[in-house]
Amino acid sequence: MKSGDIKKAAKIIKNGGLVIFPSDTVYILAVDPTNETAVKKLLGFKNRWVGKAISIAVLDKKMAEKYVVLNDNAQNIYANLLPGPFTIVSSGKHKVAKGIEAENGTLGIRIPNNTWIHDLIAELGGPVTATSANLSGRTPNYSVNFVNKLSKKKQLMIDLIVDQGKLPKNKPSTVIDATEPEIKILRRGDLITGSSKTLISKSEKETEKIAEFMFNKVIGDKPTVFGLSGDLGCGKTVFSRKIGNLLGVKEKITSPTFVIYNEYMTEKYKFLHFDLYRLGNKFEFEEIKFLEQFATSASSGLVACIEWPENMGDEYLGKLKNITNYIPVNFSYVDATTREIKF
């Protein structure tokens, strides 16, 4: 997206306009949530009554705290799940226009992991509404073609459409009520959480979504290592395969159980996929020059997934943590089709 598109959208929003804008999930309706005229226009467009909350997107936790009270539960969620495809509901500070907070005074906050939204909020210097660009009760939209089906009256209410083509078919954000000590899911999106450090998967596709979420949160300049623990068949290889795909690996990624590890090279990254199930002593790790694989790759864009990292033992795990950004991820069965993934 061009910077000019961001500046134009921000100018219109500052002047009380309504903008259809792309996000990390669906196209949204963006207005200034502190502008009463703009909010009335938004509610009129959606055919939504005052009292049914409209979420807002902010830049970071510091900005969020201007509009909501963050209890301990919310603090933990912000630290572990945001930015990401979640809307966190907290007690509002009543600093937005009527119609944004719910009837009970709560307000949903989003911090999307999305450059477009980030840049728009930075340009505005304040939040925008993050409600999906659809009429109340209708399905969310992944392209702006839906505008052609609107009545002329609705079309005239739109001041700008920022068209980024067809968005990936991600569900709208998962809505979490953080007003109480226990997490309560109000709406299920692509990622479902059981706690501030736990995500729930009911399919391989959902495990892949979790892998993508975690990858986007932690990838950086330092070698990144995901240590994947859990029983056989619980999704570790599915997770690893998705990480490899995100790095640009084109080859088929299979479990390296019998060869110990596979190495894949892409334009920007080296991806190592380890399965340590068959290793059990220090000499076997020395034989494959395990630590050297990471120590010599400090600036090479190294990412690794290590299945059965517990077989490293404390000595090797400690050394690995010193030279990499190590993220432990634990997979466990909830039932035959459900996995709990803790990070």
Image (cartoon, rainbow, N blue to C red):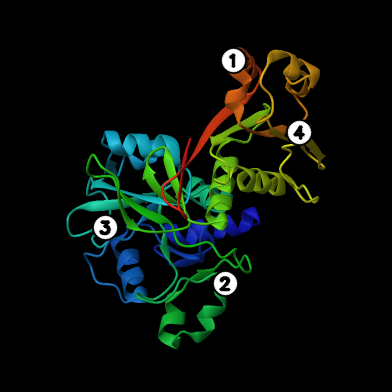
Mark 1 and mark 2 residues within 8 Å of each other at the beta carbon: no
Q: Give the residue type at disc 3.
A: Ala
Q: Residue at x 74, y 38 (%)?
A: 256
Disc 4 from disc 1: Cα separation = 20 Å
Mark 3 and mark 1 residues within 8 Å of each other at the beta carbon: no
Disc 1 from disc 2: Cα separation = 48 Å
Q: Give the residue type at disc 1.
A: Gly
Disc 2 from disc 3: Cα separation = 28 Å
- Kindly identify which residue carries mark 1: 318
Label 3 vs 1, first from the N-terminus: 3
- Kindly identify which residue carries mark 3: 97
Q: Position of residue 250 (x, y in %)?
A: 79, 51
Label 2 vs 3, first from the N-terminus: 3
Secondary structure found at label 2:
loop
- Kindly identify which residue carries mark 2: 143
- Kindly identify which residue carries mark 4: 261
Q: Give the residue type at disc 4.
A: Tyr
Secondary structure found at label 4:
strand
